[in-house]
Amino acid sequence: MPADLEITNQWIKSKRGPKNKINPRRPYAFYVEEEKGINGENTTVATIFLSNKECPFQCLMCDLWKNTTDEPVQAGDIPYQIQWALNRLPKAQNIKLYNSGNFFDINAIPEEDYGAIAGMIKDFDRVVVESHPKLINTLTFKFQEMLSPQLEIAMGLETVHPGVLKKLNKKMTLSDFERAVNILEAHNISTRAFVLLKPPFLNEQEGIMWAKRSIEFAFNTGVKCCVIIPTRYGNGALEHLGKLGYFSPPVIGSLENVLEYGIALEAGNVFADLWDIELFSKCSQCLKKRKRRLKEMNLQQLVLPKVKCECQDRD
């Protein structure tokens, strides 16, 4: 790991390209998906990606800034986005409100919108929002008190490798993460953790090993669900690190390996993030079958028979 490479907000932002044009009155994506529920049941989930101000934590691997505004949205914009998406989605049991950052950042989701948001999602069983562990605060519990659905908070653990976590510019320690989980658990709020597969500065085997350790750590702290996210190009900083030899994306076999391990722990749900899964496979012959297998493993939480293929990235 390079000791002389200083990762700062300024350095990360200097490697970026332009943002996408975002309408503050529209979510930038929304869909309904299936997901294994926390109690073992299969559920439908309406996932809405809200357009709002960029997260104040400029993490090294993040590309969510591409779909954010430069200024805070106006009061009323976020409820309007949610209702706009719900009017166009089929009915679902649960809902995820992802806002490219932190739900409890007042520069992202205005506090005065909490009541309207709670009202329009009252018929869902569970609502998942995302937050940095350091932004779990009194607003978290104020929002919870307004809700009919069970609240779940997704937080980026990323990796338990101490040197890499620091280099990610996450501005968080493992103690910060564990403290947030404990506080949320004390308030009857469940948590899920985002775990990076092969972040910068790790080779393929190290990426696998540290992802597994990260899942173990998350479950040991009390997290109920882990989502494995293969680290990908696309934000400028990782392209630069790739040229320096400090990063390359994981192969699909590594994602399969870590998912199999996580499910076998039987400590909670473990999901593989399949967004842009095509980026991690070099074999067009088996990709479709392997993607289907990963999807079914997500839903069944069972380790299914491997797809047989002679491709080179099969390990």
Image: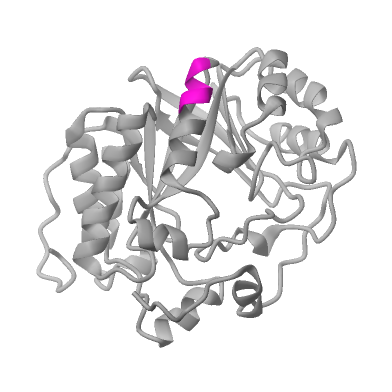
Residue 29 appears in the picture as rendered: yes
Q: Quadrant of the N terminus?
A: bottom left
Say which quarter of the image contains residue 252: bottom left
How are the residues colored? one colour
Total marks shown come to 0
Q: Residue furthest bottom?
A: 243
Q: Is residue 195 left or right of residue 78?
A: left
Which residue is painted at 35% across and 41% down in the image?
A: 271
The x and y percentages for residue 215 are 30, 42
Classify 297 as above or below 310: above
Q: Position of residue 90 (x, y in %)?
A: 61, 30
Q: Position of residue 92 (x, y in %)?
A: 56, 25
Question: Magenta residues?
Answer: 182-186
Front one among 194 and 42: 194
Q: Taking 61 as reference, is 14 above or below it?
A: below
Quadrant location, the C terminus: bottom left
Pick the residue in front: 74 or 89.
74
Choose between 4 and 294: the one closer to the eye. 4
Q: Is residue 290 visible?
A: no
Is 306 situated left or right of 46 in this image? left
**Residue 82, quarter of the rendered image:** top right
Task: Pick whichever, 245 or 98, lies toward us.
Answer: 245
**In the image, is residue 280 above or below residue 104?**
below
Q: Residue at x 31, y 39 (%)?
A: 217
Magenta part, dominant SS: helix
Left or right: 80, with 304 as reference point: right
Q: Position of residue 106 (x, y in %)?
A: 78, 40
As for residue 207 lying within the magenta part, the answer is: no
Query: Is 185 a magenta residue?
Result: yes
In the visual, does 71 lie left or right of 100?
right
The vertical placement of 62 against 265, above or below, is below
